Image (cartoon, rainbow, N blue to C red):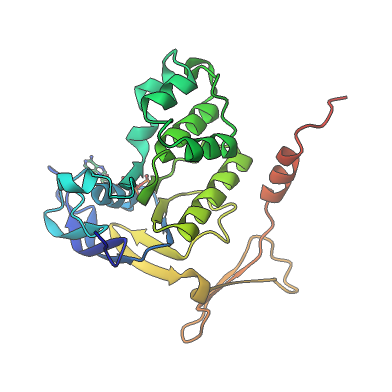
């Protein structure tokens, strides 16, 4: 089945049972294939609720949601398509807290239990990117190492639509940057799209195609990244915290001055971790 858009949402309003107020209002979204969308918003803005609805975790009663042309709540949407690709992969909070990751179990055993042999080439690529050692035992790992194993597991099967709800908080900057590069390449080389909700913007300057700002359950702004956003040097003011200027009738419609950040230093240090300690 071939859907012309990765995700289509029309007039979606969602209220949790026993809540008075909707958590999402009148959401309209058209996400094309081969795209990367960032969701930005304060705590409680509705990012997770939107991703959960797209993943079929909640039933949408008001409005229409199609992911790969299918209602995500219908059982058909869970099936793989004929290229052995999972329609939706949702990596969010509950997934982060799965109990298996704290058990006394080896990484290889864990991966084999979810089809490592079937997806061996992709699995080995992810293992290398996320620097996972298949001989590790889960209960002896740090939080970040556990998350890296989990990401290998979560991404082992190719997806059509990946919904990421801030799952990179535990990763060091190198692992995060390699993961983001892997995901970007995925959307460039095969038919798939990613929607990523995050509060961490370091290293994302060249990543998205689209940025969506959610506020109190509503989409209040959207930018098509390439056309709308330009990074400029801040000449003369000495401002190092960054300045954003909105231009009403121009393209790009937003200019962002380059900012001072410790992110490049952290990347440089961690990339050459094989220093000898004196
Ligand atoms: N299970 C639930 N039952 C009732 N209300 C909920 C539930 N989950 C979320 N909400 C409400 O829905 C609104 C949106 O929450 P949501 O978790 O989508 O925000 P978010 O943008 O993901 O926030 P954060 O950045 O903190 O993760 C909030 O007002 C929240 O209180």
| Image position of 200 with respect to 1: above or below | above
| Image position of 159 with respect to 1: above or below | above
Name the residue rendered at 51%, 55% in the picture.
184
Q: Nearer the viewer, residue 90 or 22?
A: 90
Q: Nearer the viewer, residue 212 or 151?
A: 151
Q: Would residue 273 appear left or right of 156 to someone viewing this image?
A: right
Quarter of the image with the C terminus is top right
Q: Would residue 270 appear left or right of 171 to someone viewing this image?
A: right
Q: Residue 243's spot in the image, x, y percent?
A: 60, 68
Residue at the bottom extreme, as displayed: 249
User: Looking at the rendering, which quadrant does residue 178 occupy?
Assistant: top right
Answer whether residue 210 is visible to the viewer in this image: yes
Which quarter of the frame holds ligand 1? top left
| Image position of 70 with respect to 114: above or below | below
| Image position of 73 with respect to 118: above or below | below
Residue at the top extreme, as displayed: 104
Name the residue rendered at 44%, 20% in the picture.
109
Answer whether residue 56 is visible to the viewer in this image: no
Q: Residue 181's spot in the image, x, y percent?
A: 56, 51
Name the residue rendered at 52%, 55% in the picture.
185
Q: Nearer the viewer, residue 218 or 184?
A: 184
Quarter of the image with the N terminus is bottom left
Figure label count: 0
Name the residue rendered at 43%, 62% in the picture.
35
Q: Residue 189's spot in the image, x, y percent?
A: 48, 58
């Amino acid at each position: 089945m071939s859907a012309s858009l990765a995700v289509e949402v029309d007039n979606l309003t969602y209220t949790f049972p026993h809540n008075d107020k909707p958590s999402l209002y009148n959401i309209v979204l058209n996400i094309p294939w081969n795209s990367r969308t960032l969701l930005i918003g304060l705590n409680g803005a509705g990012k997770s609720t939107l991703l959960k609805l797209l993943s079929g975790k909640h039933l949408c009663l008001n409005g229409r949601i199609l992911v790969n042309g299918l209602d995500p709540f219908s059982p058909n949407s869970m099936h793989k398509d004929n290229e052995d690709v999972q329609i939706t992969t949702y990596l969010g909070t509950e997934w982060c807290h799965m109990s298996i990751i704290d058990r006394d179990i080896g990484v290889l055993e864990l991966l084999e239990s979810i089809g490592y042999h079937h997806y061996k080439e992709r699995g080995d690529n992810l293992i290398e990117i996320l620097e996972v050692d298949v001989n590790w035992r889960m209960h002896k790992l740090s939080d970040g190492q556990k998350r890296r194993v989990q990401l290998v597991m979560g991404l082992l099967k190719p997806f059509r639509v990946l919904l990421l709800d801030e799952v990179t908080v535990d990763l060091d900057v190198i692992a995060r940057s390699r993961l983001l590069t892997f995901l970007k390449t995925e959307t460039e080389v095969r038919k798939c799209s990613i929607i990523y909700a995050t509060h961490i913007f370091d290293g994302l300057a060249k990543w998205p195609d689209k940025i969506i700002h959610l506020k109190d359950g509503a989409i209040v702004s959207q930018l098509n990244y390439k056309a709308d956003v330009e990074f400029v040097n801040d000449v003369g003011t000495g401002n190092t915290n960054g300045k954003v200027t909105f231009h009403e009738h121009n393209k790009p419609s937003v200019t962002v001055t380059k900012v001072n950040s410790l992110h490049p230093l952290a990347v440089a240090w961690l990339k050459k971790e094989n220093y000898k300690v004196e």
